[in-house]
Image (cartoon, rainbow, N blue to C red):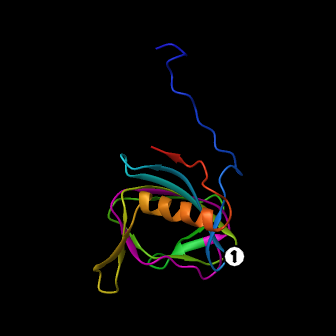
Amino acid sequence: MTAQTLPLAVHVGRDDLPFVEIGGGNLLKVIRVDEGEGLWIVENVFQRGFAVQTHRHTGPVFGYTTSGAWKYREYDYVNREGSFLYEPAGSVHTLECIEDDTRAWFHMYGVNLNLNDDGSVDSITDGPGTLAAYYALCEAQGFGRPDVLVS
């Protein structure tokens, strides 16, 4: 393989994609969605008290925290700046932010099955749905349609 046939690296700068407001000062940036792989990568900024509905992952998740602190209600550990988290497929938890301006990056495969109190599935969150919501919020908030890495 020659250098001319190698795929090019793709760079996304810190300010190339906007954060959109998702309520209560909480922010979302969608960086990458590959529907064929079931891959979706997002970055969030959460405020204290923000919580994500209890959910089960159908694929593995990798998370990295760059500031602030958040935890799962079901566990004792706290994710703080520099924390890396691996979640195997099938893990169930409820994300809760415990410090303002908590910034975390999530690399997910599959879908989140959002659960009712009795464990039944209430709704599904996935990469394509998150991307569609992100695009709609970008346009509504005056950012236009950003150049998210999509395949």
Which residue is the site of mark 1? 100
Residue 16 falls left or right of residue 133:
right
Residue 122 or 62: which is nearer the viewer? 122
Q: Residue furthest bottom?
A: 117
- The location of residue 145, given as percent across then percent down, is 60, 54
User: Which x, y percent locates residue 71?
Assistant: 54, 73
The single residue placed furthest to the top in the displayed view is 2
Does the magenta segment cover residue 67?
yes
**In the image, which residues are magenta?**
44-69
Task: Estimate how packed mark 1 is, as few (under 14), some (14 to 19) or many (20 or more) residues with alpha carbons within 10 Å.
Answer: some
Q: Decide whether residue 130 is among the magenta residues.
A: no
Q: How many marks?
A: 1
Q: Position of residue 121 (x, y in %)?
A: 30, 76
Q: In this view, does 14 lie above or below 134?
A: above
Q: In this view, does 93 lie above or below 150?
A: below
Q: Would you identify the image quadrant in which residue 57 lies? A: bottom left
- Write down the quadrant of residue 140 in the picture: bottom right
Residue 58 higher or lower than 73, as above or below: above
- In the displayed structure, does residue 128 sit left or right of residue 67? left
